[in-house]
Amino acid sequence: MPGPEGLGIAGLDYLRLEGAAPQRLRMGVSRRLGGDRSALLRHDDSERVDRARSLSYLTFVAPLDIITLPDRKLRLVSDPIERIDDDLRRFADQMLETMYDAPGIGLAAIQVGVPRRMIVLDVAQREDEAAERDPMVMINPEILTRSDELAVREEGCLSIPEYYAEVERPATLRVRFLDRAGKPQEIDAGGVLATCIQHEIDHLDGKLFIDYLSKLKRDMVIRKFTKQAKLAPKPASL
Ligand SMILES: [Zn+2]
């Protein structure tokens, strides 16, 4: 893999790894869900049985379907989350599972069709393949300050598959959010994490990374995906 600041680096939602990496990542997900050290991703059968009780977000299907261009939901402005409960935590875990499975390094709730202000991220393996996973959940994230210094990175998006382009954004930022437990957090972020946070928060405001490109390039991408969607086989009618 090229270095973190490197040339031709992978984009955001996408974690481009060579070879059989997606499979390896998928196995990693199962292992972790089976288990042990990560409270973040622990799923417990008793919770699953209860799931119909008050689950207002989604039913349990893993991984979740990621919506893509030209789905208009991608342009919705997501609503703040008012209550952090077990249903929301389970949804966050599903989002992480979907992100790892894709594989990607960031995912916003609207990308699985839920217009609520929550994003999940893990840039650890993006920066060092051998690194342990470091999943983050940010609820109602808000950027407090951005640096004047800018950084250019090649970005990609799970909702705009296999399209990459360079985007210039503030190099560092300070972000405030509620964590998975509902506790307020503030962190300073730089590098890939700063880019990723900005890309994902943009999703919550209905904004896509192609909006930073020239109108010509943006229209080209939208046209391409609109055409693809029209060509896609439709489910058989009964
Ligand atoms: Zn994206």
Image (cartoon, rainbow, N blue to C red):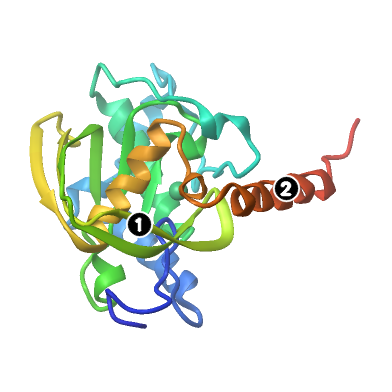
How dense is the environment of label 2, judged by Cα within 10 Å: few (below 14), some, or many (20 and up)? some
Q: Position of residue 130 (x, y in %)?
A: 25, 78
Q: Position of residue 56 (x, y in %)?
A: 43, 19
| Circle on res. 223 | 2
In this view, the residue in front, 146 or 41, is: 146
Where on the picture, by quarter, is residue 126?
Answer: bottom left
Q: Position of residue 132 (x, y in %)?
A: 21, 68
Q: Position of residue 128 (x, y in %)?
A: 24, 76
User: On the rendered image, what quadrant is the C terminus found in?
Assistant: top right
Q: Decide: is 54 above or below 106.
A: above
User: Which residue is the site of mark 1?
Assistant: 168
Residue at screen point 56% across, 43% down = 65
Q: Examine the rendering and report whether any part of residue 108 can be seen.
A: yes
Q: Secondary structure at mark 1?
A: strand
CB atoms at circles 2 and 1 under 8 Å apart?
Answer: no
Pick whichever of labels 2 and 1 is earlier in the sequence: 1
Q: Secondary structure at mark 2?
A: helix
Question: How many labels sit on residues?
Answer: 2
